[in-house]
Image: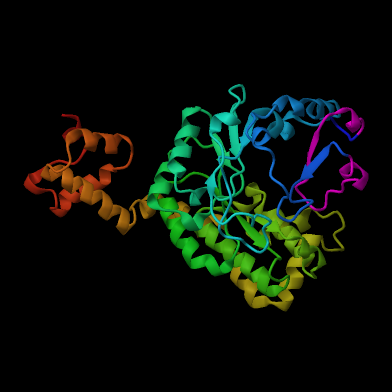
Amino acid sequence: MLDYEGLEKYDAVFLSCVFSFTKVNEAILKMPNVFYGGTGIFPDGGEDLPFEVEHSCPDYTLYDPYVNRELDLGRRRSVLSDYLDYSIGFTTRGCFRKCSFCVNKKYDKVHFHAHVNEFYDPSRPFIYLWDDNFLAFPRWREVLEELQETGRPFQFRQGLDIRLMTDEKARVLSRCRYHGDFIFAFDHVEDKELIEKKLLVWRTWADKGTRLYVLSAYDSQDEHDIESVFVRIATLMKYDCIPYIMRYESYKDSYWRPLYVNIARWCNQPQFFKKKSFREFCEANQAYHKNKETMCSAYKAMTDFESRFPDIAAKYFDLRFEEVSILRRFGRPFFNTPSADEMNRQLSVWSQFASGELDRQSALTAYYGKRLDIVCGSMLRESGKLGGGGVCRRPILCH
């Protein structure tokens, strides 16, 4: 269905509205066969779907009329890829954070929702997931194993909670068959110290593309919020991550609306962000501006802010990704040591193996399950904790 015509001929119509700005005719909501919900209508999402509906495999062919219409109108297939190439679902539901800006406050913890095979379509090459806070789920490893068994690359689209990152999670997640960038979130500048610590853990195990959602214009829409955004951008540059600026709708009422728009344009297009500072980005926009007698919106917004708050501009407007990123300046060796807790855990296991407390089969299972790392064995030998000059590299396990 591409419109609301003929709804009366169906026994039951389920209507979901995600965004509050989506308008639905009140007369439709009053029809006796229409059942509706979603955060666009009810702050808490409304009544849950019946179990048999929630746990039915999606009929992805329902997208076909819409996709065919859009293709006929000249839209590129790549723009419609979500409807054609992905199995889509939740493996877990809920989040304990209850962030004030988030509609997801219905649950106090993360709980299991569905096995992957409930929404997996083998004819589709990718999987994406809408889990609210996957890393807070105690049995996260089991879910990743289910996803890996499909053989399909997958991605969590909602933004994983980097504050919950551990060595174990980073190691396992980074070795999955993942699709596209890993996505996390950096909503509050007050979390900077914790997020830096967790990004260090993440970068110890993963050098893959990583981006973080950066909430802006929520707490305020003034120079303090602009500075907060740039503090987070600079932090992410350091760990070779790309910010994705999420503008809260109140930015539209801010004097700095054009600046918010152009910070987002700069960050949300990695081909610009990786090559140009914010100043260079605005200057490039000015160079392409048709009327050389006037300023383009980007250049005007930048110079206006700089004239009023020169200290903030001096600190952040000239930062360049290639110069700030530790990965690009020093390479992987800077990040190649697991945390002290992880190192001690692995050293303890290697010690048990060396002393005979851990049998060969258990050691092999842990090693090939990637719960032990070769470097820890070699470091144990060099530290003298492995007695008798034993060897902790692959030969001791294979012979």
- Between 294 and 103, the residue placed more toward the observer is 103
The image shows residue 32, relative to residue 194, as above or below, that is: above
For the image shown, how many numbered marks are present on the structure?
0
Inspect this view and state whether residue 283 appears. no
Residues rendered magenta in the picture: 5-31
Q: Quadrant of the N terminus?
A: top right
Asked if residue 18 shows in the view, the reply is yes
183 to the left or right of 37: left
- Please state which of residues 375 and 57 is positioned toward the viewer in this rendering: 57
- Residue 286: x and y in percent read 77, 58
Query: Which residue is at the far top?
Result: 123
Percent across and percent down for residue 204 are 39, 51
Q: In which quarter of the image is the C terminus?
A: top left
The residue located at (43%, 39%) in the rendering is 175
**Rendered position, 6 above or below 46:** above
Question: Going by the image, does 157 lie left or right of 367?
Answer: right
Which x, y percent locates residue 124?
A: 62, 25
Residue sitting at x 45%, y 48%: 138
Indicate the position of residue 217 as horizontal and vertical percent values.
71, 65
Which of the 4 quarters of the picture holds residue 221?
bottom right
Name which residue lies at 27% across and 52% down: 345
Please name the colour scheme applied to the rendered image: rainbow
Q: Is residue 139 magenta?
A: no
Furthest toward the left, the residue is 388
Image position of 256 with respect to 343: above or below:
below
**16 drawn magenta:** yes
